[in-house]
Amino acid sequence: MNRAQRRQSDSLTRQLRALIAEHGIEVMLAKMFGPDSWRYDAREQLWIVPDTQDTGSSSTYYCMRANGDWFSRLGWMRSTRNNGDHHANGHGSPPSLL
């Protein structure tokens, strides 16, 4: 990640943390991605949201923690009986925070 990308990532993380603190993560995810668009993986303690704007052959997922840390992955996701499992690779940035 170059310096500009790192600054953008840090800025997005600060904005996410502020919105989570003010509204809660579920409300923030519903505003960013739409209601019922996310799922929670209790084992990984991640909120996982598919990127509906991705038009490639694989799917992009945004993964967020309650503290505002986030990452995105290009790949696939499968659910198991044990609260889900995710496997992926790639990067990106979530849609507008407002």
Image (cartoon, rainbow, N blue to C red):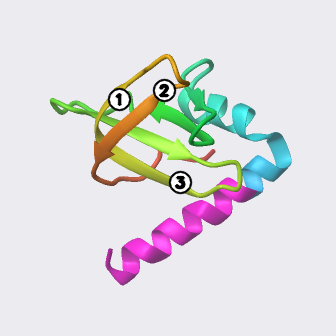
Q: Tell me whether circle 1 and circle 2 mark residues in contact (CB < 8 Å).
A: yes
The residue lying toward the viewer, choosing from 21 and 85, is: 85
- Can residue 95 be spotted in the picture? no
Check disc 2 and give the amino acid type. Answer: Gly
Local SS, label 2: loop
Pair 3/2: label in front: 2
Q: Earlier in the sequence, mark 3 or mark 2?
A: 3
Check disc 1 and give the amino acid type. Answer: Met
The picture places residue 60, in percent across and down from the top left corner, at 33, 38
The picture places residue 59, in percent across and down from the top left corner, at 28, 32
**Labelled disc at residue 84:** 2
**Labelled disc at residue 77:** 1
Q: Residues within 10 Å of mark 2 (few under 14, many from 20)?
A: some
- Report the quarter where the N terminus lies: bottom left
Above or below 46: residue 5: below
Q: Earlier in the sequence, mark 1 or mark 2?
A: 1
Q: Residue at x 55, y 25 (%)?
A: 83
State the extent of the magenta-drawn residues as a range: 1-17
For disc 3, the marked residue is 70
The residue lying toward the viewer, choosing from 55 and 79, is: 79
Q: CA distance from mark 3 to mark 2?
A: 18 Å
Q: Residue at x 57, y 46 (%)?
A: 64
Q: Left of 26 or right of it: where is 46?
A: left
